[in-house]
Amino acid sequence: MDVLRLLTWATLMTWVTLITLCSSAYAAGRAENRFGTIHVDGRKTGTVHYTIEYGEKGDVETLRTRASLSILGIKLFNFEQNLHEEWRGGGLRLMRSRTEDDGTHYSASLNRGPEKYKGVVNDKPIELPGHAFPASVWHYNVVRQSLLFDLMTLKPMNVRIARSDETMTVNNKTLAVERFDFTGDWKATVWFDQKRQLVKFEYPVPGHTVTIQLDD
């Protein structure tokens, strides 16, 4: 079950990344639905449905993720999260999340103060340095950080990031992409296209590799 929970969290992290439109302007109240596929060790094992809602200034206000994983037609876990983020001036100002991770529930909130974040996870208070950045991989600036925090537990994670240029074939089209490898407390690889929009996300778990591909 530990591996399944890691797979679930990998899915969450991935589909938070699918909001790759943070620098664009959108009409008030606009909502979008995005879909993707989950692969474990190269084999398609699940799908993701992601809903994005925008506020009056075009900022992402609400993120909702639903994911499931099945092997041989047997559903192994359920995952659901309601996540509300407010960004101003390129920085996260507050976050609220409620998550069900295969029967385990998390309730988290976080507010940015003058020098640090103050939050609560399942009624336990927590503080984070003001320079910490959410592991919201949809935000391209995540690749410029050294201290991230987990969106479900608010756990801080020190990371190192290496960048390289690659090409990738998506729907029979060759794309020039930027690859970023995260190591340290959080291990992951993300690929962004030339518009700094996420193309792919990969996350290792014990004995397996989870890959989430954005559907066109």
Image: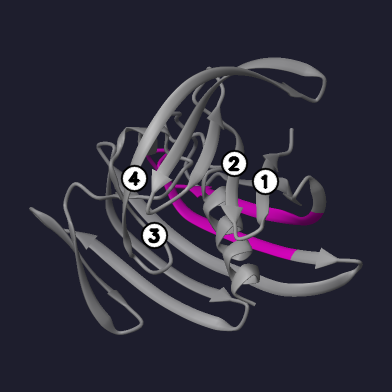
The answer to whether the residue labelled 1 contacts the one labelled 2, judged by CB atoms less than 8 Å apart, is yes
* Mark sitting earlier along the chain (1/2): 2
The local crowd at label 2, few if under 14, some if 14 to 19, many if 20 or more residues have their Cα within 10 Å, is many
Q: CA distance from mark 2 to mark 4?
A: 16 Å
Colour pattern: one colour
Q: Residue 160 versus residue 104: which sits nearer the camera?
A: 160
Amino acid identity at mark 2: Phe
As for residue 63 lying within the magenta part, the answer is: yes
Q: Residue 183, image x and y in percent?
A: 41, 43
* Mark sitting earlier along the chain (3/2): 3
Residue pointed to by mark 4: 159
Q: Residue 7, image x and y in percent?
A: 63, 62
The local crowd at label 3, few if under 14, some if 14 to 19, many if 20 or more residues have their Cα within 10 Å, is some
* Mark sitting earlier along the chain (4/3): 3
Give the structural element (helix, strand or loop) at label 2.
strand
Q: Left of 45 or right of it: where is 57? A: left
Q: CA distance from mark 1 to mark 4?
A: 20 Å
Q: Is residue 76 above or below residue 207?
A: below
Q: Is residue 47 visible?
A: yes
Residue pointed to by mark 3: 150
Residue pointed to by mark 2: 201
- The image quadrant that residue 119 belongs to is bottom left
Could you say which disc has been placed on residue 211 in the image? 1
The answer to whether the residue labelled 1 contacts the one labelled 4, judged by CB atoms less than 8 Å apart, is no
In percent of the image, x 37 and y 39: which residue is there?
142
Q: Which residues are magenta?
A: 45-68
The local crowd at label 1, few if under 14, some if 14 to 19, many if 20 or more residues have their Cα within 10 Å, is many
Q: Is residue 28 above or below residue 71?
A: above
